[in-house]
Image (tube, rainbow, N blue to C red):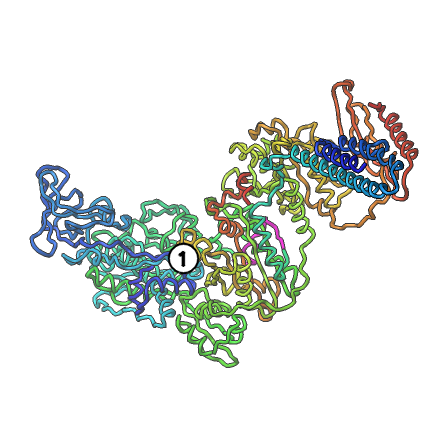
Amino acid sequence: MLVSYQWLKDYVDIDMDPQELADKLTMVGLEVSSVTRLGPNMEGVLVGYVEHVDPHPNSDRLSLCRVDIGKGEPLNIVCGAPNVAAGQKVPVAMIGTCLPNGQKIEKAVIRKVESHGMICSGDEMGLDAALLPKDQQEGIMVLPEDSVVGDSVEKTLNLDDTVFEIDLTPNRADCMSIRNIAREVGAIAGLKLKPLDLDFEESTDALTKDMISVEIKDPDLCGRYVARVVTGVTIGPSPAWLQNRLRAVGVRPISNIVDVTNFVMMEMGQPLHAFDYRFLEEKTIVVRRAGEGEKIITLDGQERQLDENTLVIADGKRPVAIAGIMGGENSEIMEDTTTVLIESANFNMVNIRRSSKRLGLRSESSMRFEKGVNIEGAREAADRAAKLMANLGGGRVASGVVDNYPRKWTPVKIELNVKKVNNLLDLNLSEEKIVDLLGSIDLKSDSIGHDTLLVTVPPFRLDIEREIDLVEEVARLYGYEKIPLTIPEGDVGQQKMTWEQVLERKCKEILTGCGLTEVISFSFLNPKSFDKMGLPEDHSMRKGVEISNPLSEEHSVMRTSLIPNLLEIAQRNVSRKVLDLSIFEFGRVFHPGEETGEPIESPVLSGLVMGSMFGGWKWGKEEFDFFFLKGVLEELMDRLNIKDTKWEPCSFPGLHPGRSARLIRGDKILGVLGEVHPDVLENYELSSKACIFELDFTVLAALGSQEKQYTVLQRFPSAERDLAIIVSEDIAAAELEEVIINAGGDILAECRLFDVYRGKQIPENKKSLAYSLIYRSPERTLTDEEINEKHEEIKQKLFTEFGAELR
Amino acid sequence: MLDSLKKIKIDAMEELDRVKDLNEVEEIRIKYLGKKGVLTQLLRGMGKLSEEERPAVGKLANEVRDFLEKQIETSRIEIRNREKEKKLARERIDVTLPGKKILLGKKHPLTQVLDEIKEIFIGMGFSIAEGPEIETDEYNFERLNLPKDHPAREMQDTFFITDNILLRTQTSPVQAHVMDEMVPNLPIRIIAPGRVFRRDDDSTHSPMFHQVEGLLVDENVTFADLKGTLFAFVRQMFGKGVQFRLRPSYFPFTEPSAEVDISCIICGGKGCRTCSHSGWLEILGSGLVHPKVLEMSGYDSNKVSGYAFGMGVERITMLKYGIDDIRVFFENDARFLAQF
């Protein structure tokens, strides 16, 4: 909402610096987001009167103008604009003037003719061309007829006004009115609003009720319809003051009658519409729902399809306006209009919002109706408009008014307890003070005893419904800055993070400690990634929760796994030449609930590694491979006290069939780890191998714990024996280890695999594994014989169970 | 004899001066002090001396022996030290060579800032609550005093799953979930961090971002308590020097409502591009819990009051680190993540 400082001064006698006023408005809840001077300084640009226009002797496009500037001889000025004409008042930049666009005006000879100045366009003067009539947007600016020749254009256009841009909150629809903002200004400055001048004479020879009848067929959608008629008007441009007011708040002046409707809407917040009376069939206004298939061409030239949910203003035969949104071309004010019907009505907020949305048509009018307009102000606005139209258009106001008001407003009265105000705000305001504060914005309070006020809410404050709304008014008018600072009292209780919250933090700490960096990706994914991952058509990961109005296909399904997003992150990094990556993400995945249909959210923990880790000149590169990531997960399990987990080879779509494993414990599946399938790598344009994991955080939380138990340190010495064996390729390391550990019994403290070898000296399809076995007893020092005996036993077991041979 | 002893002393000293290693010292020791050594031999000849000569020679001989033993020991130490130094010199390394690269990951900057926010509020006695990211219209809007067709619904453009199921546009629905669970017990002191979604995508808006909601419900909670709590937060988060103000605003689920501004942390309040030359930065929305919201959860709004607040984690992180495009958070460029 744009607000002119000088316009505000029409209603309240403020004498406050505009910036100071802006700051104070912000602090009462009307946030001023910018304060700007309406137009640039323009010394040396004067109002000139074009006496006559002759064609330029040496050019078809140029003309030679004789312009009176109120002093001395009229000036000869060459002008290239097509719209220049004798009788116009125009801005003239005198020789020596520097225009806001930087142009310096000098005496010039244009095609052998001297030019003593320049007639300016709005653009050249740094004004917003969009606020000028169409023909002036291309050519020179034509000043209002009542401009005074020789005056500065700055004064004529009132350019030293200041404009505030106010970001209104949705509850303050009343402030879509300069006058209502002036009321707030008055409250800030301790001033009362000046009364509005509504005095005018009605014509005795025309009665409004004889000229028009109004029928409201749908009173639920139209609570009030006020009609006034002004006869004998002459359509023409508005005077300077009116054009200036409108331009200051961003409204383009059109003609006196239309400008008045816009002016009153800006002033009072009541949208108005002016019909050309002669086009109204049967001299009847019917407010009704549109019939199926009815159409109207609105003022913007668009044909609009209407339906029964759209409220229209119709005459005896057809719609002439879409109620509260936009008028129709068929009854528009024309250059030769003489009789005007003014509509000042009140429409249902919800209906206007829906219709405006459905039609894709928003207007200054609909923006006000959809937030609520003061129904009690309709009559006043009609009067105000009638008065101005009669003044400016030279017309006469028909006697009386047609005021169809089926949904009469009932005043809202609310009890306000003084103690409650002071308790909630931690203040100590007297009853009188509260009465004064509320009174400053015309909320009248009467004391009804027991520290209670009965507050009457004025009809323009539709947002005030109950006591707390009044508490807010008191708080903001008194000043939030005067409310003290305290620390809440009361029992703090025992605050603890839940186990899941602790675990989440712990996981992040462990994974970062292992070299993985956290990423955060969108909770959506691209359904195309299911194909890129090579998921079979019926795979459960494809069954996602779909967004019905996504921004793009890319973000149209809630993710069922974090892996596709991690692969996309890898792809983006590779495309930016970042080839080494070790990342993880914690987040939720979403599945359509099978029974209830309600989506199910479950947290998962996923990661991806790609490329290698560079240790430095001495250590070289270490490849990020399956076993790196497996090590990370083993560390994670260890730190979360999840013991006895097993890794099982598995096949998982998108993963290398020979290099993927499931992490299980008992009958619970913790997650999956694997190398990304080469086809998937190709789909994501990844040149090096990548490995991923995804863990079910819920299972992790169920199995993990923070409990720790101290174990007495071993006092007795240990002995180490190596064991290198050759076994068939198809024997899994885990199987060998299990046998070693079982055979080792109590005295085998540790079994470390330190080498896996294939190649020279090892037969085809065989591999060599070398273990270092550490023997120790918690109770005594072991003898060599004991150890040798056990070591031999382990060897024998391996020979018999796996056909192992010593290397 | 005395002369011989003196000569032995001089000879031995000269030889010791020339030694290069421990073996040579040992050779000298054997040569002079060994069982068949020169000094030993000489002393064996003492018996031939007269009674008068014997004490003087004996004394000198002992002196020479003691002296040589000491000298030999000194030489040994010197040589050992010399050798140690040589070894250390040989072991010299180029200390300017770079060290081993330790691979440690980092938490996402949003997580780091969120952790900081959580710590501050946990310190003030708040617990952490969570709620679903896919919400119902009821919890996302209606329970927050935003009935259907409320004009303020337009403040947020929503992603829908169905007409009634949507992606939460704010963390505020957690308020209603927590109150439902707690009613009629008091107090409630929670913060609820999480992802939220709005149909927006440009350099200052992301379709997904993070908020932290705060809620305190108890008897006699005042607007001053809200101010005090937020002031404590702002000072811990942004430093003691930061200015702070509450400015009237509007949220359907709080009343009175306030926008919280801090003095611009970029320019210190003088006015710059970041603060649109106002000197202030908006960082939080807040207010007293609207009585309707309390009532919908079954609390008696005449007996119980509360405050609520909400902040954008991206916004705070962007201010903290001078980031000017929200999208970088979700691109996850490793070079970006490595900076925090």
Q: Chain of mark 1?
A: B
As drawn, B275 above or below A465:
above
Instruction: Give the residue number, with chain letter if any, for mark 1.
Output: B270
Magenta span of residues: B129-146
Image coords of residue A700 (percent x, y):
71, 45
Percent x, y of residue A507: 67, 45
Instruction: Let me know if residue B72 appears in the view.
Output: yes
Quarter containing the N terminus of chain B: top right
Instruction: Tell me which corner region of the image, top left, top right, bottom left or bottom right, holds residue A643.
Output: top right
Indicate whether A720 appears above or below A116: above
In the rendered image, the vertical position of residue B174 relative to residue B21, given as above or below: below
Callout count: 1
Q: Is residue B206 above or below residue B27?
A: below
Query: Can residue A787 be found in the magenta stretch?
Result: no
> Dot 1 surroundings within 10 Å: few (below 14), some, or many (20 or more)?
some
Residue B182 occupies quadrant: bottom right
User: Which residue is more in the foreground, B49 or B17?
Assistant: B49
Question: Left of B192 or right of it: where is A374?
Answer: left
Q: Residue A735 at x, y = what percent?
A: 81, 31
- Asked if the stretch drawn in magenta spans residue B139, the answer is yes
- Residue at 47% x, 59% y is B261
Q: Nearer the viewer, residue B214 or A441?
A: B214
- Going by the numbered disc 1, the residue's amino acid type is Lys
